Amino acid sequence: MKINLTKTLLINFIIIILVSLITTGLISTYMIDNRFDVYLLEEHKEKIKNIQSIINSAIEKNRSHPDFAEEGLTRYALLENYYVRITDADNNLIYTTGKSHLMQNRIIGMGHNMMGPMMGRWMDRALGTYQEDVYTIELGDRVYGRVTIGYFGKSNMSAEAMVFKSTLYKSMLISLIIAILIGVLTSLLVSRQLGIPIKKITRASREITEGNLSVRTDTKTHIKEIYDLAHSINYLASSLQKQESLRKRLTSDMAHEIRTPIATVKSHIEAFLDGIWEATPDKIKTCHDEINRLSSLVENLEDINRLQKANHILDKTTFNLTEELRRIIDSIIPQFNKKNLKLNFQSKVNLNVFMDKGKFKQIMYNLLSNAFKYSYEDGTVNVDAYVENKNLIIKVQDFGMGISPTDLPHIFEHLYRGDPSRTRTTGGSGIGLTITKTLVEAHGGRIVAESDKEKGTVFTVTFPLSSLRKGT
Ligand code: ADP
């Protein structure tokens, strides 16, 4: 069974309140019973002693007609709520305070009269029952008489103590009611604070599962976890949306890419079959070229898969960065010469790096061959390597056709190609930069592109030096 947030919070708050108050109650009762009761018992004994000493001193003053009232017994008994009755050795009453003053009588009367029998009974229980103790008054070795001391209270506890105890219980009951009210209000408030954003997030994720990827949830909350959750949901939706549009793009691009060579090959072969064309080496070469394009397309697709599957297992070794860069540049110079492109290389580092040499080569070849493809004849390409802020930075700069601001954010995506008509001439397939980015990131680095249309492009690869050390 699933319980909603409000109920869960409410139940938990009430449990916490009850547990804490019951614990407090038990501890207080324990303290009262074990300490306060002892104290009160002592106090009670002290009072009995006082009464006895008042009686003794009155008898000492006048043995035949002691004046107990004069000695202060009446005042004391009234003040402390005791009933005192003194009889002589023959059981004749010689003094009594009467019982009318006992506070409890009044309270119980009040309880019975004003609050009905239920309340009266409760008061009886709370204040305790009336008790009497009898003591012998001795004078030398003979019995002078007897004193009866009466009072209300449980286990000799004074009535005030009983009132105190019952007041304590009452105040605990009131605190319990107030605490439960506060608990209910707090749980309602907290559940509102938590529940509303959670409901919104749930609604958004349900819409996402139903396919509405444009939905975004509101992130207005001061609760960090909920804020993070809302952000993750929004991020999830936007990346799913991106993936979705990429997938659509990929399929339409692939269809488009495949359709043209197939149509060319088909029309050529049909023309050969119908005898319209003769299968001249030229025409067969066109077919062959188109088939090559198809197979390189399939290879690219495989590359994408391999890239995702291989999880970029790197075969790292230590090598000198500048020497390796120099080798790469030297090997590509003949190609650059074909377009009369000048390739400047400047390295300000003398660094041994721990990287996958083959993958590093691939990164550089991809960037350099793009610079080659998208540069005009007689242009220049600069390659710089230097260290800045504990990072190794490699820049590949060209002054070619550049990338439009609309294409720039997408160039690292699978099969993304800026301006297809242009790439048809350059022969690109839109996979190079995806591979480059994945390889750079597999080495703990980053790659960014800056470009101005018709002015040129700079690719900056940054590797933290810490990620190029052995053991990383
Ligand atoms: P391609 O094989 O098409 O070059 P890439 O993934 O290497 O694929 O590049 C993606 C797109 O980025 C290219 O189609 C091109 O539009 C753009 N691009 C990449 N490098 C450059 C560059 N140096 N100058 C201009 N455009 C570039």
Image (cartoon, helix red, strand yellow):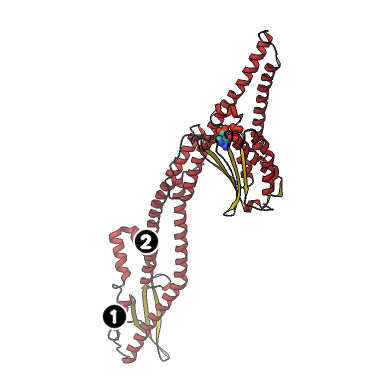
- For label 1, the crowd category at 10 Å Cα-Cα, with few meaning under 14, some 14 to 19 and many 20 or more, is few
- Secondary structure of residue under mark 2: helix
**Is ligand 1 less than 8 Å from the beta carbon at label 2?**
no
Up/down of 27 relative to 383, above or below: below
Residue type beneath disc 1? Arg
- For label 2, the crowd category at 10 Å Cα-Cα, with few meaning under 14, some 14 to 19 and many 20 or more, is some
The foreground one among 198 and 248 is: 248
Name the residue rendered at 48%, 32% in the picture: 212
Up/down of 375 relative to 65, above or below: above
User: Percent position (x, y) of residue 419?
Assistant: 53, 29
- Secondary structure of residue under mark 1: helix
Inspect this view and state whether residue 412 appears: no
> Residue 149 vs residue 416: left or right?
left
Extreme-top residue of the structure: 275
Query: Residue 431's image quarter?
Result: top right
Residue identifier under label 1? 75
Residue identifier under label 2? 122
Query: Residue 40's image quarter?
Result: bottom left
